[in-house]
Amino acid sequence: MTTYILRRIIQTLVLLVVLSYLCFNLMTLMPGDPVELMISSNPKITAEDVARLREFYGLDQPTYVRYQRWVSTILEGDLGFSRTYRIPVSEMLGPSLKYTFILSMSSLFLSLLIAIPLGIYCALRPNSKFDYIVNLLSFAGISAPSFWLGIVLIIIFSVKLGWLPAGGYQTTGMVYENIFSEILDKAKYLILPVLSLSIQSIGRFSRFARSAMLEVMRNDYIRTARAKGLTERVVIWRHGFRNALIPLITIVTLSLSSVFSGALITETFFAYPGAGRLIYTSIIGNDFNVAMVAFIISIAMVLVMSLIADLLYGVADPRISYE
Amino acid sequence: METNNTLSQTKIAELETAQSFYKMVYNQFKENKAALFGLFTIIFFVIIAVGAPVIEWALGVDANTQNVFNRYKPPFSQVQASQDVRDQMVQTFYLKSPELAKDIETELLAKNLVTPIRPEDAMYDWVNLSPEKAIEAIKQINTPAKDDLIKSVKNFSSYHIFGTDELGRDVLMRLVYGTQVSMGVGVLVAIVSAFIGLLVGALAGYYGGVIDTILMRTTDALLSLPLLPVLVVIAAIDLQKVPFLSAITQYGNESIIKLVFILCLFSWMVVARLVRGSILSLREREFILAAKTLGATDATIILRHMFPNVIAPLLVSVTLGVGESILFEAALSFLGLGIQPPTPSWGNMLFNALELIYKAPFLAIIPGVLILLVVVSFNFLGDGLQDAIDPKSVRR
Amino acid sequence: MKKLAFVLVAAAILNTACTKKDSTGTSASAGATSSTNSKLSNAELKIGISQEFENFNPLISTMMATTYMSRMSIRTLDSINADGKWIPVLAKEIPTFENKKAVIKKIGGKDHVVAVWEILDNAMWGDGTPLTCADFEFASKVAASPNVSVADKETYSQVEKIEADPKNPKKCTFTYDKVRWDFYMLGTFFPLPKHLEEPIFKKYGSIKEGYEKNSLYTKDPTNPGLYHGAYLVSEIQLGDHVTFTPNPKFYGEAAKIKKIIVKLIPNTGTLEANLRSGTIDLISTMGLALDQALAFDKKIKEEKLGYEVLFQPSTVYEHIDLNLDNPFLKDVKVRKALLYAINKDDLVNALFEGKQLPALHLVTPKDAWYTDDPAKITIYKYNKREADRLLDEAGWKMGADGYRMKDGKKLSFTIMTTAGNKTRELVQVYLQNQWKQVGIEVSAKNEPARVFFGETTKKRKFDSMALFAWVSSPESSPKVTLHSSKIPSAKNGYSGQNQMGWVNKNVDDLTTKLEAELDPAKRIKMVHEILKYYTDEVPVLPLYYRSDVAVIPTQMKNYRLTGHQFPETNEVEKWTLE
């Protein structure tokens, strides 16, 4: 087990390096490097200016040299500078990662809290009326495009009813008397984005929970457990749910891996200053340092979560062994 | 009494003869009302997609005719054609039958029905009269083309069941043609990605070791690769310049090929991981061990013993995949990677309508509802198939 | 089911919003908005903006949204007002040859313009330090440093030397690099606070990007000493909002609004919702798309909301660059036919409801150089039959499929533009349809803006047509877009903007001579000559001049859109809500 974990960690690190190099290349392959963007925005630029700026940004160097430089500064603990915002990347990314984390974690918790019991309940009463209704609602949730959902929520709750703010993360320029008023104010701004994110994932999670549970509950050992006279609760949770965990683990860890990448569309619609939007603007604006750090974070999250998922498989199903 | 007895005897016989697999599946499936609903809805949309030209002909409205002075008309509107369309009609008439046109021209002028600045504009002026007046005028003229012309003038007035869009095009016909793209892309991508995912997941899960490492790390890599820069880079690639691709892209369908390629590339990973997870656990089951001891080949074990067991999560993700692909396509057109204008798809129609959701809500609502309907139908169908195929779920 | 219910609810709600049938619904919503409006006062104004912004260092910032905001706090010697006239801002007056404040001097065997700029006596930085010539000289020095990435270096490098009068530190003598008539156009020549920034520049100026990383605009952006305009920046959160408060040391009339918050709402579709729910009070020019503005304008009138939509013709010129290397486009008849075949009046009236003007050529109507005189330029009025005639003449015969053919080849083009720009995509499809009617097949191929501008137009990789816009200022030299040496190629580092590949000897001469011509009347004549060639040879298909749109509360006064690169915030101190 330990060797397996160790091996996986080494693999993960190697993959991280490979992928970061790949991303670095992708960023350079993208048409419109900083100088090209300047050329297109400034008609007066001359050929000499172009050469000067290329050298200035080190764009005259081959990619691998630039990658080496970048890695060495990262290893020194310097995340670099945001070219567009002119502030250190850490100052730029820190807050937006925090906001995104709050948003995606609240949504994930909310969806799991609702979806898993719902899915299990349906699986225990397949093809009942309740099952049908939940099914339909889940599909509706899944197939509602997030941009569509966002704007509908805003129209209903902000414009028509006026209950909730349409966008932002706090009342701008507000001075908080105490921590509670601050939490209250910020929570008000969180409701709509969390709702719009959750409606989709509730549908997805409950579908997976239902189908996994349905699959398990047909097994002979469930019948045996019931025949033994175990209480229904023990049958469902100890024997049933535990075995239904495998697909659920996959889905949940996949969702967890994106808690820092943010939800671009939701954040844009609700003017929420999260990482998704920052990453998008940094890629579009060729803000190399911000984009690369964001890539590393999101890649690392996926890789780590994939490792955790594999380890959890073993916990959920002791027959799965890693040798 | 006797009749009853024979009946039950045939029933017994029926029960005793082994049913074929497909028959069992069929019998199970047709019991499931929701699945049948799903199937019929999908068939309905497939018919619409295939029969789009027929619908166009039947309704007498086509998807590309613009009418810019009648934009954003609400559903159930009667609309008059634009000057372009009218002029075009006259011009084709001149091209087709120049002598007839000349005659009509002179007669129109002689009877003083129109007063154009230049005599050769007579027919153009006539066609731009109000429909009643134009028909009135042509009735007074003696020409073999009279009926045709009256019919054309009547056609200038069109009825739009779902209203018109931002260029005054018929929303219904655009939705009909959008069905082709959206259903086609959605189904194709879902199937291809499920296939790739199944293959990769099964190989990785069954063999483990190096194969597992390589395949799953590739999956992780693709899953973690930031989508946006990849898309922008792909957008910059000119498919015509890639040698082996130039052959397939020469018919002007470059954007669709690009789209399907991108969608497939980025949607098989979740399936792969799901399948692998299940296979990992199946691998250690007794029945697989039994099959192995009996000397079954790997292929037999995977195909006959494992696949039926992973079909449940697979069908769920395939059916979910259809809806996701339809929406993903919409988001891609925002980056210029989707379907290029003016070809409609439900996704880009929905996306385009969003900015003006206040002004023309129906433009956003109708494609939204269609997407919902199709996605729900696919899911019901998937559910029904899963129940029908799965031997464990047979309930008598 | 839930979604279906949602849809129905949404449909019901939207319908009440769109029609006036449900009187209770409408009056309720109107009541709600008018009450938010009556809440508006000079205490606070919240402006919505849809584009990202950066820090305010005027030498380094490049984003439009930053320019928009920074003009509240940072000004220049002169600028263009809402009427399109150059007016002094920080300067007492604009030096000209007539008022003898500008002269041509021979220095080192070469002619130079030397001009005297005198800064307003009471102009000072927010911490009370007077604003002097030294601040301009310092800015010029920073801009010249190879370690600072100034995008628009030319503005600063055109002034070779800045000297202060020994007796009056506010009287500056600017020596320009050569004789140029546009020497007084210093609207983007910003002063930097020497008393704050010089120590930083001395310390870090020798390190690459050292100055911009350590500048107070980055490290301490709310320091009042960095600003001299009507407002000081009191809070800045990148990616979200900026708060401005009046500058007590401002040289001009005192600002009336006590607090201005500029808030980033990145999605234009939700700007209106934010406005109506009171998150913002005003939508800036960097907000609504024209189609949205038109729809909102109608709704305001129907529902009597307390807002006004402003439309202001701007200097943005939407056009299609033709790639003159395309074999079909080499024929001027085909180019002319393309132009005759498009009904620009209908386009403008139908799609823009007349709020944007059809374009004749690259000079915009607000410009002193503009002309629509048919005696001076060639004007193409929509004429389908003329287009047909020209194409027939050029040998393109109508085929059975409705498209024209010549030598077995179909008359077919590709029109490319930025993906995701809805107005352009709309225009693109409209044009496709019009050209189809004269037998020209045009297919669309759109790309993300980055690819389109970074690769396709820059390297002239578009096969035949590229639809995009030029943002120019009044009386700007057309040399960069028309001179044959400005055809982008690997040789000149793709730095020119003559993406058509247009070569015309006379135009080359005229554009070069124009830059040194001191007589305004002669300049106009030369420009008209250039426009004659431009409209005769049709290297570009002009489409329309864009308009700026903004939504303001009805009680707001003195808010004037400018329609050019110097935004309305140059006059922010005049704005009032009471």
Image (tube, coloured by chain):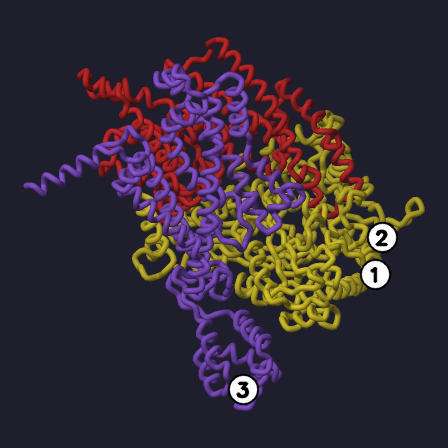
Name the spot of residue C341 as percent of width and height, x first.
Answer: 63, 67
Camera sees residue C517: no
In the image, the chain rendered in red is: A
* Farthest top residue in view: A2
Q: Which mark is residue B300?
A: none
Quadrant in the picture for the N terminus of chain B: top left
Badge nearest the viewer, 2 or 1: 1
Q: In this view, does C572 lie to the left or right of A309?
A: right
Q: Which amino acid does label 3 sit on?
A: Leu
Whether residue B90 is situated above or below residue C408 in the rendered picture = below
The residue indicated by pointer 1 is: C506
* Farthest right residue in view: C109
Name the spot of residue C135 as percent of width and height, x first.
Answer: 73, 38
Callout 1 crowding tier (Cα within 10 Å): few <14, some 14–19, many ≥20: few
In terms of secondary structure, where does tag 2 sit? strand
Whether residue C269 is situated above or below residue A201 in the rendered picture = below
Q: Which mark is residue B108?
A: 3
